[in-house]
Structures are given as structure tokens and as C-alpha cells.
Image (cartoon, grey):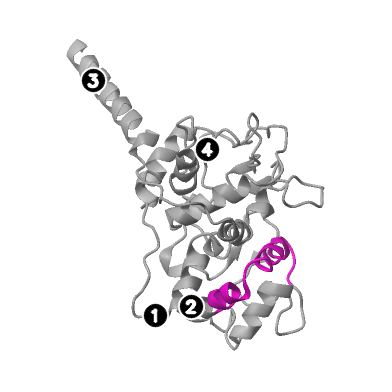
């Protein structure tokens, strides 16, 4: 009996040790790349800020100035409620005291300066595709914004999602750390659109269904899905009859500029915020996104008013 107990305890200790090692943020390699030399490009940083939708989640709610990213927005999900943090350059309550290396680690690896996992409500699964130079420029632009005082409350998550350490296993399975790789057989504009859509724009994060683990099935990417906040349906944005089949590049550009669809409707809900952001990036970038979306393999999605 004593031998059996000793074996069970040994296995338990071994399992606990394995869990600690495998879930360590140090196991995440994304975001450890060298920082590119040279001065930051603030104009490009501004483009990354708006393409990335930073203001949509991080702007302080109930005020008109979307360049005050003091956080506090509640993001409801099937896993609990997340509260977007303050990302202003405040030195005490936000990222004003961060280094560029820490910011890169957060953006691409989902790891905080304190060595803790961020939840993937922060879409680093898409931001990992970003080039380090673009992350550098984004960080420099954010540091030009107003410093907002005040820290945001913690997330409201039920067990077991409240165990942040367990995200290490999720990342080992679903965070590959690969940056965007251009397709040499495609045009420069197509590659630009693919980069903006798959990386900073993180369009698939909302416009795709997810499985029980919160992962987007590759074969259903961009085919639409339930709104994470349980308010309606996020539409299919592939060129299928249930999506944007028949749309022209100009149609897509118009939606990203004014929110008006080819049918005379206007987008609403969270997409209205996306349009406000996308209207701030160069028109050539909106056209590139349109080119990429219209080249996607058609996926059958939910049909009807969305």
C-alpha cells in the first residue's frame, strides 16, 4: 500500500512539474525577435493604430475622444467578461513605463512585462503576424497620445477560465508565432491586403466561428459567426452567395470608408466602430483589403439579414 501511495504521489508531482513547465510564459517564443534599427515612423504607427482597431476596445467609454485609450470597455464572451485595459502612455497606470521589447512581447506573444499570460480576448493570435517594425511604429505612436490616469478593474471570469496559467497549454497548441509571409505569386497590393486583414486588422477574430476551445477552424475562417457579445450575427465576408459574392472592390472600399453597403444599408453594431477606424487609414490600404477579401475561397455562411 505504501508503495502504491508513493507511486501515486510521484506521478502527481511529475504531472504538477510538467504543468508548471509547459504553462510557463517563457515557453512562448513569439515576441522575442530583435527590434529593427532606425527611427519609428509615426505616420505608419498611426496607420497600425487605426488598422488594428486599438481605439475600438481601449478608448475610455462614454467620451468622444477616441485617442484617449484609458480602457474600461466590457467585452462579454462565452468565457466571461473581459475589461479592456488602459494602454495610454501613463507611466503608472498604463504602458508609459514599458520598454519597446515589452510591448513587442505583449503584442506578438501575449505575455505581460510581469511575465503573465494575457487572455486571447487581446487578439495576439492575429497580431503575431505583424512585422516587428510595425509594432515599433505603433508603440511610438501610442506614446504621443494623451496619458490617461486610472487602472481598469480585473476580468470577471468563472472557473476554470480564471486560472490564467492554463493559457500556456492553449498557446502551445494554438499560437504558432509566425509572422506574415508574402506570397511571391501575388501582387504587392494583394499581399498588403492579406497582411492588414490577417495581422493588425484581425478581421477573422470576429468574422469566424469558434469551437469549444475558442479556436477558429481553418476551414471556416471568415465565414461569419455568432457575435462574441451574443448580440446578433457577424457576417460572412468571403465571396459566397451568403457573403459578399457580387460585390466589387469599390463596394468593399465604400463599406470600409462610410459603412454603406451596395444595397443602401449601413453597417451597425461593432462594425460601425471598425469603419470609423478603417476610414482613417490610406485609401490604398482599404483597396488592398478589398482585393484580398474578394480573393478568399467562398465559404457558405449564414444567409439573410446580419
Task: Specify the label residue 161 is tagged with.
Answer: 4
Residue 145 picture location, percent across and down: 68, 46
Q: Is residue 85 above or below residue 133?
A: above
> Label 1, on which residue?
186
Circle 3: element type: helix
Q: Is the magenta stretch mostly helix, strand or loop?
A: helix
Horizontal placement of 281 versus 149: left or right? Answer: left
Circle 2: element type: helix
Q: In this view, does 71 lie above or below 231?
A: above
Q: What's the residue at 58%, 58% (across, down)? A: 52
Instruction: Give the spatial CA distance, label 1 vs label 2.
Output: 8 Å
Category of crowding for the residue at label 2, using alpha-carbon neighbours closer than 10 angstroms: few (below 14), some (14–19), many (at least 20): some
Q: Which of marks 4 and 2 is nearer the N terminus?
A: 4
Observer able to see residue 214: no
Instruction: Give the spatial CA distance, label 4 vs label 1.
Output: 41 Å
Q: Do the residues labelled 3 and 4 touch (CB within 8 Å)?
A: no
Q: Which of marks 4 and 1 is nearer the N terminus?
A: 4
Q: Is residue 152 above or below residue 173?
A: above
Task: Specify the label residue 189 is tagged with.
Answer: 2
Q: Is residue 280 part of the magenta span, yes or no?
A: yes
Category of crowding for the residue at label 3, using alpha-carbon neighbours closer than 10 angstroms: few (below 14), some (14–19), many (at least 20): few
Circle 4: element type: loop
Residue 224 picture location, percent across and down: 57, 68
Residue 177 picture location, percent across and down: 37, 52
Q: What's the residue at 78%, 51% (across, down)? A: 65
Between disc 4 and disc 1, the foreground one is: 1
Q: Most extreme residue toward the left, as rendered? A: 3
Horizontal placement of 87 versus 215: left or right? Answer: right
Q: Which of marks 3 and 4 is nearer the N terminus?
A: 3
Q: Do the residues labelled 2 and 3 touch (CB within 8 Å)?
A: no
Task: Specify the label residue 10 is tagged with.
Answer: 3
Amino acid at each position: 500500500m505504501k508503495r502504491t501511495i508513493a507511486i501515486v504521489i510521484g506521478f502527481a508531482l511529475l504531472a504538477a512539474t510538467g504543468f508548471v513547465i509547459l504553462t510557463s510564459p517563457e515557453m512562448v517564443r513569439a515576441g522575442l525577435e530583435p527590434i529593427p534599427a532606425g527611427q519609428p515612423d509615426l505616420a505608419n504607427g498611426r496607420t497600425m493604430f487605426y488598422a488594428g482597431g486599438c481605439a475600438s476596445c481601449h478608448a475610455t467609454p462614454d467620451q468622444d475622444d477616441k485617442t484617449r485609450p484609458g480602457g474600461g470597455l466590457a467585452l462579454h464572451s462565452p468565457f466571461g467578461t473581459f475589461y479592456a485595459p488602459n494602454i495610454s502612455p501613463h507611466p503608472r497606470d498604463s504602458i508609459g513605463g514599458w520598454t519597446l521589447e515589452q510591448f513587442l512581447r505583449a503584442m506578438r506573444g501575449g505575455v505581460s512585462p510581469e511575465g503573465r499570460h494575457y487572455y486571447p480576448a487581446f487578439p495576439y493570435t492575429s497580431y503575431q503576424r505583424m512585422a516587428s517594425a510595425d509594432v515599433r511604429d505603433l508603440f511610438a505612436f501610442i506614446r504621443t497620445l494623451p496619458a490617461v490616469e486610472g487602472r481598469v478593474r480585473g476580468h470577471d471570469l468563472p472557473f476554470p477560465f480564471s486560472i490564467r496559467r492554463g493559457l500556456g497549454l492553449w498557446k502551445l497548441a494554438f499560437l504558432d508565432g509566425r509572422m506574415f509571409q508574402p506570397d511571391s505569386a501575388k501582387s504587392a497590393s494583394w499581399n498588403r491586403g492579406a497582411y492588414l486583414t490577417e495581422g493588425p486588422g484581425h478581421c477573422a477574430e470576429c468574422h469566424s466561428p469558434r469551437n469549444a476551445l475558442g479556436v477558429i477552424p481553418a476551414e471556416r475562417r471568415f465565414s461569419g459567426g455568432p457575435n462574441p457579445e451574443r448580440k446578433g450575427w457577424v457576417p460572412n465576408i468571403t465571396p459566397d452567395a451568403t457573403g459578399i459574392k457580387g460585390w466589387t472592390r469599390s463596394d468593399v472600399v465604400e463599406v470600409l470608408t462610410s459603412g454603406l453597403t451596395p444595397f443602401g444599408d449601413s453597417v451597425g453594431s461593432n462594425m460601425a466602430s471598425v469603419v470609423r477606424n478603417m476610414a482613417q487609414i490610406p485609401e490604398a490600404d482599404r483597396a488592398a483589403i478589398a482585393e484580398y477579401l474578394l480573393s478568399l475561397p467562398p465559404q457558405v455562411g449564414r444567409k439573410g439579414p446580419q
